[in-house]
Amino acid sequence: MKLVKLNALTCGKYIALSLTVFLMACSATKQSAKTIVMNDQFLDSLFKTNASLQAFIAEKDSLNIQVIYTKIDRDKNNAPTFTSYDFNVNPVRYFYPASTVKMPVAFLALEKLRDLKKFKIDRNTETNTQPSINGQAPFYTFDSAGSIAKYVEEIFLVSDNEAFNRLYEFVGPEYIHQKLNKKGYNDVAIRHRLSVALTDAQNRQTNAIKFIDANGNVLYNQAEQLSKATYKEPEIKLGKGYYSDGKLVDAPFNFTYKNRLQLADLNKMLQACLFPEVNKPSRFAIDENDRKFLLRSMSAFPREGLVHKYSAQENPDRDVKFLMEGLATTPAYNHIRCFNKSGLAYGYLTDVAYFVDFENKVEFMLSATILSNKDQVFNDDKYDFETIGYPFMKLLSKTVYDHELKRPKQFIPNLDEFKINY
C-alpha cells in the first residue's frame, strides 16, 4: 500500500524525487491501493451543472454543507486508486455527528471481540448487561438476550440507539478514545450514550457485561469500568436559542461536551473498513468472517436482517440511507447497493457512503453533512429535514452518480467482492 498526497506547491527536486518514489512503489506493488488527495474546485464546478442543487450550494456556509467525493479507478489487476475531492470541508466548523458515531464503535466492538477469542466468545454469544447506576436492563429488546451481532446489525439496519449504547458499554469510552487516536483519528470525542440524559460522570461509567454460552455458563465477565479519557474541548456554542425543560432559552446551544467526529475521519473510517489494504495504520483489526458480516449489515435493507427482520412498511428500504434516494428513481434498484452510516439530530443530517452499481460497473464514495435548522433554535423538534436536508442529499447523490455514469474508465472494475447474498 502506498499513500500519496499531491501538493501543487511542491517544487524542484522534491517533485522529481516524489515521482520517482511513487513510480517505483507502483511498479513494485501493483496489487496495492493508492490514495490521491485533491483539494481543488472540481466539486464546485460539478455542482453548477445542477441548478436545483446550486440553490443549496449558494447557502453552503449558513447550511454548514460539507462534502467529500471519492472517485475510484481500478488498474488492470483491479487494484483501486482513490482520488478524493473536498467541498467546504473545515475541521473547525462543527457539526453534530449524531448516529454516525455508531459506525466506528461497531468497528471497534468487532475488533475487541478478536482480542477476546481465548474466552471462546464471538459476535453471536449471548450478552447480559448488569444493572448499575445508569439503569441498564439485563437484556436487549425483542424479548430475547442481546449479542454483539444483534447490536451491530441493528445499528446499521435501523440506527437503533439502544444497540449503540450496548456497544458503548462493551468497548467503553476510554477504549474508543485510545484506539481511534492510535489509528490516527486525533480529533474525535465519542463520550456519551444516545437518547438518554446522563451526566458526564455517568457516561464515563460503563456497566458490567457477561458473555454466556448456551448452557448458561459465563465465558467472560467484563467488570464495570470508569473512563479516564481526556478530550479536546474547544468551546462550541451555536444557534440563536434552544429549549430546556420546555422553555426557550435565548442563548446559543452548547455543543462543547457533545460527541465530535470530523467528516474526513468518517470517510476515512468507512474506506478503511471497505478497503483494508488502503492505509494500514488507520484500519480496523476485524476477523474476515466478522468483516463480511459487517459489510452485509452496512448494505442490507431492514427487511434483510439476519438477526432481526423489519417490515418494509414500518422501515422503508432507504430509511437510513439518505444519499440512496438520488440513485434510485424506481423501486427496481436491486443492482445498486449502499454501504453506509447516516445520522440525524439537532437539525444536522449526515451520511457517509460507498455506492456500487453492479449493472453499470460504477463505484464511488460520497460523504456529506448539512444543517437543516433555518430558525437556528435547537431542541425544539422543528427542523427542516423535509425541505432542506433530504432534498439536498438526493440532489447531491444524483449529481455525482450521473457524473460517474458518464465518466470514462480505462479498466472496468470487478465488483464481485461486494456482491452479497441477502
Image (spheres, rainbow, N blue to C red):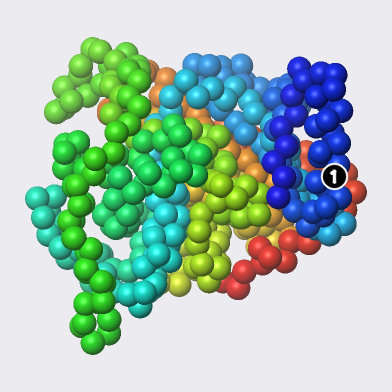
Q: Which residue is mark 1?
A: 24
Tell me where residue 113 sits by quadrant. bottom left
Give residue 169's position: percent from left, percent from top: 26, 54
Q: Is residue 234 visible?
A: yes
Q: Is residue 90 above or below residue 333?
A: above
The residue sitting at 54% across, 22% down in the picture is 90
Tell how many labels.
Answer: 1
The residue sitting at 30% across, 45% down in the picture is 173
Q: Is residue 402 visible?
A: no
Give residue 417's position: percent from left, percent from top: 68, 65
Give residue 152's position: percent from left, percent from top: 41, 60
In the image, farthest residue toward the bottom: 215
Compared across the picture, whether 125 is left or right of 250 comes to right
The foreground one among 102 and 160 is 102
Q: Secondary structure at mark 1?
A: helix
Q: Is residue 46 above or below residue 181?
A: above
Compared across the picture, whether 407 is left or right of 99 comes to right
Tell me where residue 292 sits by quadrant. bottom right
Q: Quadrant of the C terminus?
A: bottom right
The residue sitting at 51% across, 67% down in the picture is 287
The foreground one among 272 and 253 is 272
Q: Amino acid at mark 1?
A: Met
Q: Label 1: few (<14), some or many (≥20) within 10 Å?
A: few
Q: Is residue 295 above or below residue 242?
A: below
In the image, farthest residue toward the left: 133
Q: Is residue 246 above or below residue 108?
A: above
Give residue 120's position: percent from left, percent from top: 35, 78
